[in-house]
Amino acid sequence: MITAKAPPPPSSSGFFRKIESGPSPAAETLGFSKLRGINVSGLYRSRRSFVLHARSKPIKAKENAGASLIDDWFKPIKGKEESDTEDRATAFSGKNLPQMSNVGNSTNIMWHDCPIQKQDRQQLLQQKGCVIWLTGLSGSGKSTIACALSRSLHSRGKLSYILDGDNIRHGLNHDLSFRAEDRSENIRRIGEVAKLFADAGVICITSLISPYQKDRDACRALLPKGDFIEVFIDVPLQVCEARDPKGLYKLARAGKIKGFTGIDDPYEAPCSCEIVLQQKGSGCKSPSDMAEIVISYLEENGYLRA
């Protein structure tokens, strides 16, 4: 017959009993001998006071083997709010903050670099990004030559994009008038966009009257030396006015348009441009022929290869 042994009577805590153990080599080595005689039921009832007591008197062991184990065990775990507070404190102290810039009315901005640079994109496209800036009077043939140039580049497997003055005013610059200050802003914005195209490795062709030398010079200054190719479409005013493809000269002469370039607003011809395309007399070259002159310049100066 099997007799069941009655369980030991519960301790005053209702669950834990007082734990006593004799010394052991392992306990001595790890520093656990100091834990002998701890009343676990008391630990259960007053955990907070025990933790405070343990932290105020850290347990030391031979060669600190067990003490660091026990000490780490009793370290409080930081909550998310406490960690966030420390992070904010570090930020407010100014440590490890990136260098910020102020440009114009834009404050606290930072330039972000990308590991893929212009040279990498040019290698991919097998060409060099640049800006071909076509300038001249209204009716001089800028847009027509720009399209002929883009078509010729495309046939050679080269990527280009045209920024036409009227097209840009349909979107990005639709808020600008033809007053002198707005015309300057119009050129500045297009210059910045052209710079991005060139940085992408694209051959960017701009087709703009851009009448003021200072504005064209400002756009040139945005790009590395050699990447701004100014092309002056040198066509006399009388030839442009005789063409008058948009009927604007007629309106300007009638006083219905104010500030029209060549009539009551000046055009400042380039003084040191890279290319001059002249159309004088009856022996005018075709747009394709003039485009080929620009293509020859690009080939000779290495823009059509990476």
Image: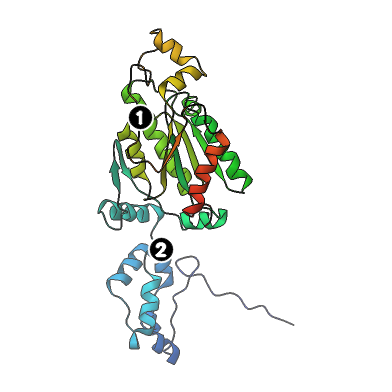
Q: Quadrant of the N terminus?
A: bottom right
Residue lying at the far left of the rendered structure: 93
Say whether disc 2 or disc 1 marks the residue closer to the N-terminus. 2
Name the disc covering residue 45, or none: 2
Q: Which residue is mark 1?
A: 185
Residue 303 on image: x %, y %: 49, 52
Q: Can you see residue 117?
A: no
Q: Amino acid at mark 2?
A: Arg
Res. 217 image quadrant: top left
The vertical placement of 226 against 252, above or below, is below
Residue lying at the far bottom of the rendered structure: 25
Residue lying at the far front of the rendered structure: 282
The residue shown at (38%, 52%) is 81
Residue 97 on image: x %, y %: 31, 54
> How far apart in space, not on screen, are marks 2 and 1 (Cα)?
76 Å
Residue 137 on image: x %, y %: 42, 26
**Residue placed most toward the observer, 1 or 232:** 232
The residue shown at (46%, 41%) is 132
Tag nearer the camera, 2 or 1: 1
Q: Can you see residue 118?
A: yes
Q: Is residue 30 left or right of residue 102?
A: right
Q: Is residue 296 left or right of residue 210?
A: right
